[in-house]
Image: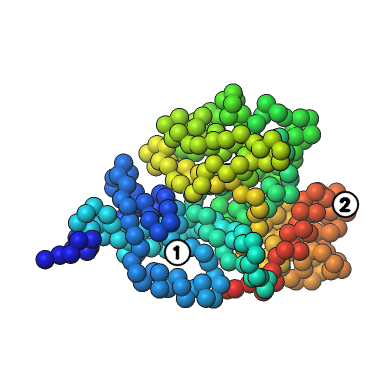
Amino acid sequence: MQEQNEPCAEAPIEAKIARIESNTYYAVPLADPSRIIRCTLRGKFKKDFRLKKEKLYTTDICVVGDQVELIMNEDGTGVIQTICPRKNHLSRKAPKIKGASYRGERLEQVIAANLDALYVVMSFQRPEFNNKVLDRFLVVGESAQIEVAIIMNKFDLVTDEDQDWIEFYEDLGYAVFCTCAKTGAGVARLKESFRGKTSLMWGQSGVGKSSLLNNMFPGLLLSTSDISEWSNRGKHTTVSVQMFEIDENSFIVDTPGVREIDPYGIRQEDLSHYFVEFVDYINECKYSGCTHNHEPGCAVVEAVEAGEISEFRYDSYLRMLDTTEDDMFF
């Protein structure tokens, strides 16, 4: 007689991970997206994961967006047997834990996998727009080889200086969506851009990701909160990464707001490849492997001095270069 929770001898079900809570995985079958199966991981994954953690690779085994194969239990739950290879994944350095001892290494925190587009959500005010933070998000998206767009939310608070930033990033080739979750301005164009893709919205706490999603898709009923009056910073309302089907073949991944964003796994000599306006110059440098910092005959530095590359972006690049490891774990 088969024990309770023992997997049934049936063909595996192909599914996509939509939400994770602690050690519980919620999977949506590809053949029936209206259904959600509560799952656990097969024991072998946990054993492999412990070995990986000892080598300081990653904090995650299975993430939202992963395509998996699962076997059903008699009680209606599932066991994930296979995690399929990812076409891509979005990650950052895992946040530092207060009181923990570090020797320079940081784990990789994978946010989600198998994405078609990343939408970086910024706000004009509350919290105030910060181009250096935006540049870090853009580098993460570019390094993952994911299509990147920018959402500038809270358009009702826009200033003339903010308008300049919109034109600046559009000139770099990024699609910029100006929106206001409160009034609905700009959301129709943004909503249409999600069609037929798996898209992830990512940004700082308080920029209005959940409010925007509620405006476009009222049935989601996502939690929102006001900006802290004393710090002018966002409060976390979304507590976990979640994927929602918004129409046939269209999915949105909502994420918790972040306080810091640090790209993971990028070598100093490769960082310049993820600043889109640097690409035309990096092969003209005198030395191969140029970090575009102190080397003589650097075409990127010459382009900055000639006004062909923005000093704002070059400053962002140098700041990231200082926190980019030359010795990564590959």
Left or right: 236, with 80 as reference point = right
Q: Which sits in the foreground, 320 or 38?
A: 38
Residue 59 pos. (x, y %) = 52, 64
Label 1 neighbour load within 10 Å: few <14, some 14-19, many 20+: some
The residue that appears at 82% across and 64% down in the rendered structure is 293
Label 2 vs 1, first from the N-terminus: 1
- The type of residue carrying mark 1 is Ile
The residue that appears at 84% across and 53% down in the rendered structure is 304
Vertically, is 152 above or below 39?
Answer: above
Label 2 neighbour load within 10 Å: few <14, some 14-19, many 20+: few
Give the image quarter of residue 104: bottom right
Q: Which sits in the foreground, 89 or 98?
A: 98
Q: Secondary structure at mark 2?
A: loop
Q: Residue furthest top?
A: 183
- The type of residue carrying mark 2 is Ala
2 or 1: mark nearer the eye: 1
Q: Secondary structure at mark 1?
A: loop
Vertically, is 86 above or below 19?
Answer: below
The residue that appears at 75% across and 71% down in the rendered structure is 288
The residue wearing badge 2 is 306
Q: Which mark is residue 61?
A: 1
Quarter of the N terminus within the rendering: bottom left
Left or right: 17, with 228 as reference point = left
Residue 61 pos. (x, y %) = 45, 64
Residue 89 pos. (x, y %) = 51, 58
Left or right: 63, with 283 as reference point = left
